[in-house]
Image (tube, rainbow, N blue to C red):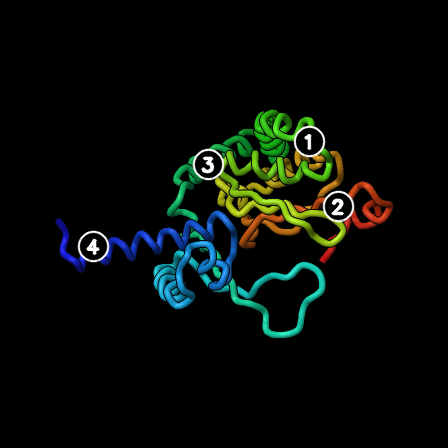
Amino acid sequence: MGTPQEELATGERSTRNRVARSILDHGPSTVTELAGRLGLTPAAVRRHLDALVADDVVEAREQRVYGARTRGRPAKVFALTDCGRDAFDQSYDKLAADALRWIAEQGGGQEAVAAFARARITAQASVYRRAIEGVSPDKRAEALAKALSQDGYAATARTAPVGEQLCQHHCPVAHVAEQFPQLCEAETEIFAELLGTHVQRLATIAHGDGVCTTFIPKTSTDASASTAGRNPA
């Protein structure tokens, strides 16, 4: 049986892991948001965040705001660093990146990588397509988010100005996509096909953002057609 000090240390590590996991699942979060989700006091959350920052697991950022900014100082959010993401499930990144680089260098070029990316996401899309079949248009983004979450993307859908935002708070292939953006491009194309409308990528984890964000314009009004191709922010 461990000493009281050892048990305390184990409990601290467990809670710290819960904080990091909550950021992974929900994306960049404020102290208040983390405290509410985890049932902790803001002071306790700050203490764990200080330790996670010191260990290069999370980093503080200014909160990104889409749409009109409100007055006052932007809220500080905490996001996982690359090191923090590595601690979860990206151990095969180097192998995947090496394989795609080999494909490109063996005469296939970037076109071959793009073809692979399309084939990969098309195979996954069959599951996503079944998830949204029979769902009303206004519920498709939510249904797609649930299907993506089952594949490890920790996705959510939320209302945005003149449309919706599909947010993927985790990306199992983020490090590979950083080197091969064809993976993100193919995924965006599939989202448009599944949802039956043009969509726009606003942010990606692969490019250093805290969350992959896809804007889905409304299709039931004339206004959606005029805003589908531009950033609503």
Q: Which of the numbered marks, if any, corresponds to residue 98? A: 3
The CA distance from mark 3 to mark 4 is: 42 Å
Asked whether 152 or 105 is in front, the reply is 152
Asked whether 12 or 151 is in front, the reply is 12
Hey, what amino acid is under mark 1?
Val
Q: Which of the numbered marks, if any, corresponds to residue 217? A: 2
The CA distance from mark 4 to mark 1 is: 49 Å
Of marks 2 and 4, the one in the foreground:
4
Which of pointers 3 and 1 lies earlier in the amino acid sequence? 3
Q: Which of the numbered marks, if any, corresponds to residue 135? A: 1
Q: Secondary structure at mark 1?
A: loop
Whether tag 2 and tag 4 are in contact, CB under 8 A, the answer is no
Compared across the picture, whether 49 is left or right of 222 comes to left
Hey, what amino acid is under mark 3?
Asp
The CA distance from mark 2 to mark 4 is: 51 Å
Residue assigned mark 4:
7
**Number of residues whose C-alpha sits closer than 10 Å to that of mark 2, classed few (under 14), some (14–19) or many (20 or more):** many
Residue 44's place in the image compared with 228, above or below, is: below
